[in-house]
Amino acid sequence: MILIDGKKIASELREELKKEVSLLKSKYKKVPGLTVILIGELAPSKIYVKNKEKSANEVGLKSDIIKYPHTIDEKTILEKIKELNNDESVSGILVQLPLPKHIDKQKVIETIIPSKDVDGFHPENVGNLSSGYDSSVPCTPLGCYLLIKKIEPNLSGKKAVVIGRSNLNGKPMTQLLLKENCTVTITHSKTKYLKEECLKGDIIVAAVGIPELVRGDWVKKDAIVIDVGINKTDKGIVGDVNFDEVSKVAKALTPVPGGVGPMTIACLLKNTIDCFKRSQK
Ligand code: NAD
């Protein structure tokens, strides 16, 4: 079984991005810039944002964090986003989720100009992805996609099963696999016979949030299994896949942690650079 080492693959991707930033710097005499807006004091959000900044600096991007207290009003945030939309030194804008309840998430997402939407959440980018056009793609599914391609470069005709239909993971994952000519089944909490659906998959992507939902006897021999889940349990962090059981059947499997997680931030950097490149055309 191939253990898909997301940490290593993400580090290789960061190395490539670092080289690319250096080339862009010589060509355009400026570097791509990522601005993250952090609202409130949620510990996980603060850690994510710190890691994003560290990785951005590592590859040579210009990186800024704008912090607001959780009591900040929606108008101030929307005005700041509009200001950043017009700031040429900013290639990508990310507002760290979740937001305080009094701030409308969709309004925030739609205020970010699509060309700087490094999360790929703006409806225009969602539409572009589903139409098969060039666009920002949400970072976690993009990371999953790159991991799958490392194992199997030609996905044409493969049967893929995506578990979970969130806007963040399941839906964009489905679009990326469709673009590669997979036959995709998207499953969710109301799917009947989930095990039987999974057994048909040459590729399974689990993005659910239920510890070890996918068991060894749900997986076809030699399937590629990507585990997006991050679940806190008494025995520590586990994924949506029962690692011990599935590793005996699968051809390749991501561990949790150390699989999809590290790819998410690397893909955010990639999206920022891609936004910069599109803006120079
Ligand atoms: P979500 O709650 O928005 O969506 C979960 C999906 O799972 C839903 O579409 C739901 O229909 C489906 N689902 C729920 N119960 C099910 C069941 N019994 N059978 C089949 N489907 C079921 O979650 P999300 O934001 O997509 O995140 C999913 C998981 O991925 C979570 O554990 C989250 O922590 C993790 N995550 C990881 C990363 C990363 O970088 N590795 C990034 C984002 C999210």
Image (cartoon, rainbow, N blue to C red):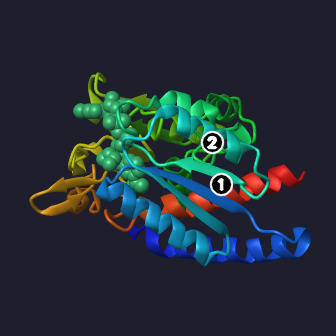
Compared to residue 50, the image places residue 138 above or below, namely: above
Residue 85 visible within the image: yes
Compared to residue 24, the image places residue 200 above or below, namely: above
Residue 227 visible within the image: no
**Disc 1 secondary structure class:** helix
Near-viewer residue (122 or 162): 122
Q: Residues within 10 Å of mark 1 (few under 14, many from 20)?
A: many
Q: Residue at x 61, y 44 (%)?
A: 137
Relative to residue 82, is residue 190 drawn left or right? left
The image position of residue 15, as x and y in percent, is 63, 77
Question: Which is more foreground, mark 2 or mark 1?
Answer: 2
The image position of residue 34, as x and y in percent, is 64, 59
Near-viewer residue (244 or 19): 19
**Disc 2 secondary structure class:** helix
Q: Residues within 10 Å of mark 2 (few under 14, many from 20)?
A: many
Q: Residue at x 42, y 38 (%)?
A: 162
Q: Residue at x 62, y 28 (%)?
A: 123
Give the numbered dot on residue 271: 1
Instruction: State the residue position of label 2.
Output: 81
Residue type at the position of mark 2: Ile
Quarter of the image for residue 152 reads bottom right
Q: Residue at x 66, y 28 (%)?
A: 127
Contact between labelled residues 1 and 2, with CB atoms less than 8 Å apart? no
Relative to residue 132, is residue 40 drawn left or right? left
Relative to residue 244, is residue 184 drawn left or right? right
Q: Split into 4 quadrants, where in the image is the N terminus?
A: bottom left
Residue type at the position of mark 1: Asn
Quarter of the image for residue 78 reads top right
Q: Which quarter of the rendered image does ligand 1 occupy?
A: top left
> Disc 2 to disc 1, how far (Cα)?
18 Å
